[in-house]
Image: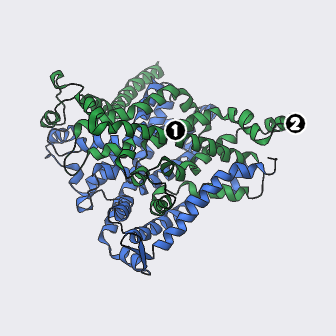
Chain colours: A green, B blue
Amino acid sequence: MNLVRQGYAYRIGISIVLLLLAAASLGPFIYLLVISFVTDMSQVFKNGIALKITPEMLSLDSYRLLLQDDGGKYFSWFMNSIMVTVLFTVLSISFCSMVGYGITMYEFKGKTTILVLVMSTMMIPVETLIIPLYNEINLFHLTNSYFGVVLPFAVAPFTIFFFLQYAQSLSKDFMEAARIDGCGEFRIFLTVMAPLMKPAFSAMIILQATTAWNDFLWPLIVMSNSEDFTLTVGIQTYLSPYGNNYNLLFAGGVVSVIPVIMLFFACQRLFMEGIMQGGIKG
Amino acid sequence: MTKRTAPYLFCAPFILTFAIFMVYPMIDMIYRSFYKLEGIRSYRFVGFDNYHRIATDPHIGNAIWTTLGFTAGIVAVNLVLPLLLALALNNKLTPFRNLFRSAFYIPALTSVVVAGIFFRLFLAGNADTPLNAAMRLFGKEPREWLFDTKMTGIVALVLTSTWRWLGLNILYFLSALQTISRELYDAAHVDGANTLQRFRHVTLPGIRPIILFVTTILTYGGLRMFGESYVLWNGNTPGDIGLTIVLYIYRTAFGQFDMGYASAMSVLFFLLLMVLNFFYIQSMGIGSRREER
């Protein structure tokens, strides 16, 4: 009886704590969503960060402005973000899965060296190399191009490491069986082994797509023409020392979140599974 | 492609990326750190001048303290809070576990820009912001949190980053908690261990590797802090409030085009991270991990 009551108290207590924290997690979204419909932003700030918003204050004006601003510039930023994200995700997932799989499934000369290189570069932040990388991208004439944004970081050691860990749970017997059937090594990877790594793929697709979509520093450096900006780089130009355009900022921020949220909810189950099972075991 | 050549072809993308986008830039960076950019394209050899400048630059000290303070804060908060939440979400008694898990993960999907937009407003000096209204309840004056002191600047960075980073760290801890076998807990229970003892002697040892992993990514995430700082202060950091190492390097290189000096700073920053990396790899013991499996 005592245990039952304890369980009851725990449930109520933990629910309250989790609800409060979930509110803190989701509150900023809800706030930005509501405020993005406010027509006259000066109203909002007079009222003190819009705690009192009335229906009369709301309209779709911010979104209309967003579509029309500067000949639909927001739309081209949106398309740039889509292109960069797709390109980055495709390159990153196909190459990193190959490398991770290759390191794990084969015994070969130099295996330890490559493993040590992957591990030791895994934690080196890209931030340390932005200056020489910028010079290099400049040298290759890749500034203001999608490839300039994507190429230097597509084959990231962290992603390789994730696939490498996941591949360790695969049995080499399947490979032997396929070899006896006369399958080539690359076809074994593509048709036999890769499907077995499906949870790892789905987890990494979401993680890489959100990373690429939200990446800020590198696109900020590579893209200097305003029509070539990605969303993150573009939206923050609405904040400027000469005054902030809050209408565009809030509406633009809300729209920029929609694609990743949609992707997340579409693949949520697979994503959680992939992270949980494949996961980093350290 | 034979069984012998296959692994090399599989690893080729990494080897190429490593050579082109890691080794070459590293050499280029070291080379440039001894030069000074003059005009648009001409570099002049200046020896160790850039390195001497670092020692006397007052901004560097500020940037290092802000970065270290932020790193300490982010590691402490994002180790303890996600672990506690993961424990709660791993407990079968907790209701709506999947729903909460998603709720905590959703901020991780947003960009630093969106997070920055919100937290700039949240931390603004207006007397009616939720934060300042709460402070008034305690009889405190409203503050311009982002521009108050270096300390509030660091707290602002920790708050903004935690909002986005929490969800993924919860997932890492959850995945580790689920690998601990039920039987260990049952055995501890039979031996009369209470909740705290079970946590200390079963849970903690079981998730030790993930604690190490999360600490490491948080440390690097802290040291490399750029985005939150850039967006919260919009690139202006009066009195160096919120100025991090990477932001300072970025501004020196792409604001003032002082490429040589920025390269010299990057070289030292890189060396620092390599040293940390060395300790991390030591602690993971790469050589021995193969045999374990």
Under tag 2, what secondary structure? helix
Under mark 1, the amino acid is: Val
Q: Is residue B191 left or right of residue B231?
A: right
Residue A50 is situated, as x and y percent measured from the top left of the image, at 18, 32
- Which circle marks residue B262 in the picture? none
Residue that carries the numbered disc 1 in the rendered image: A86
Looking at the rendering, which quadrant does residue A163 occupy?
top right
Q: Nearer the viewer, residue A231 or A12?
A: A231
Under mark 2, the amino acid is: Ile
Residue shown at the point (46%, 49%) measured from the top left: A145
- Give the letter of the chain under mark 1: A
Q: Residues within 10 Å of mark 2 (few under 14, many from 20)?
A: few
Q: Nearer the viewer, residue B214 or B187?
A: B214
Residue A81 visible in the displayed image: yes
Under tag 1, what secondary structure? helix
Residue that carries the numbered disc 2 in the rendered image: A180
Residue shown at the point (19%, 50%) measured from the top left: A242
In the rendered image, the residue lying farthest to the top is A1
Looking at the rendering, which quadrant does residue A118 occupy?
bottom right
